[in-house]
Amino acid sequence: MESNTGSVAVGEANPTVKDFRKALGKEDFDLIIDSLKSIPTELTFTRLEFKIHDDTKRIMVRIYDKASDELITEIPPEKFLDLIAGLWKQAGLIVDEKV
């Protein structure tokens, strides 16, 4: 079995890829594939971490540098979600115990 590391031939087995290629035409399809291959390699040096904020139950995405394990950014920022949780607590919207 072939690996699908950027090989267009492997993707052709996928009906969605076939339909996409048919709709665009070979020349445009190849142009898009080539542009995807030229995405900067800096993007491969990051890792994503998904976390659910404890109080708000919202999903957070943290982007880390793989080499230094340094946090690059959070979406949304945890401080923002902490602020929302604090406001919810003040308004009585978060209940810690079931009655």
Image: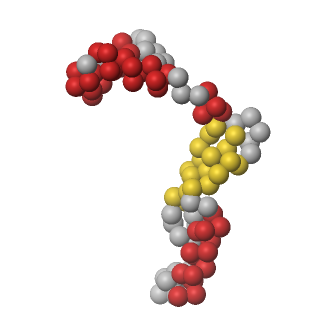
- In the picture, measured across the screen, residue 30 lies left or right of residue 20, that is right
- In the picture, measured across the screen, residue 16 lies left or right of residue 9, that is left
Which percent across, then down, holds residue 90?
58, 87
Location of residue 28 with respect to 58 vertically, above or below: above
Q: Nearer the viewer, residue 95 or 99?
A: 95
- In the picture, measured across the screen, residue 2 lies left or right of residue 53, that is left
Residue at 67% of width from left, 44% of height from top?
A: 64
Location of residue 14 with respect to 45 vertically, above or below: above
User: What is the quadrant of residue 15 in the picture?
Assistant: top left
User: What is the quadrant of residue 81 in the picture?
Assistant: bottom right
Q: Nearer the viewer, residue 21 or 57?
A: 21
Q: How many numbered marks have been drawn onto this rendered protein structure? A: 0
Which percent across, then down, holds residue 1?
41, 11
Q: Nearer the viewer, residue 78 or 2?
A: 78
Location of residue 43 with respect to 70 vertically, above or below: above
Judging from the image, the colouring scheme is secondary structure
Which percent across, then down, holds residue 36?
46, 25
- In the picture, measured across the screen, residue 91 lies left or right of residue 44, that is left
Which percent across, then down, holds residue 17?
30, 24
Taking the image as drawn, is residue 18 in sight?
Answer: no
Taking the image as drawn, is residue 73 in sight?
Answer: yes
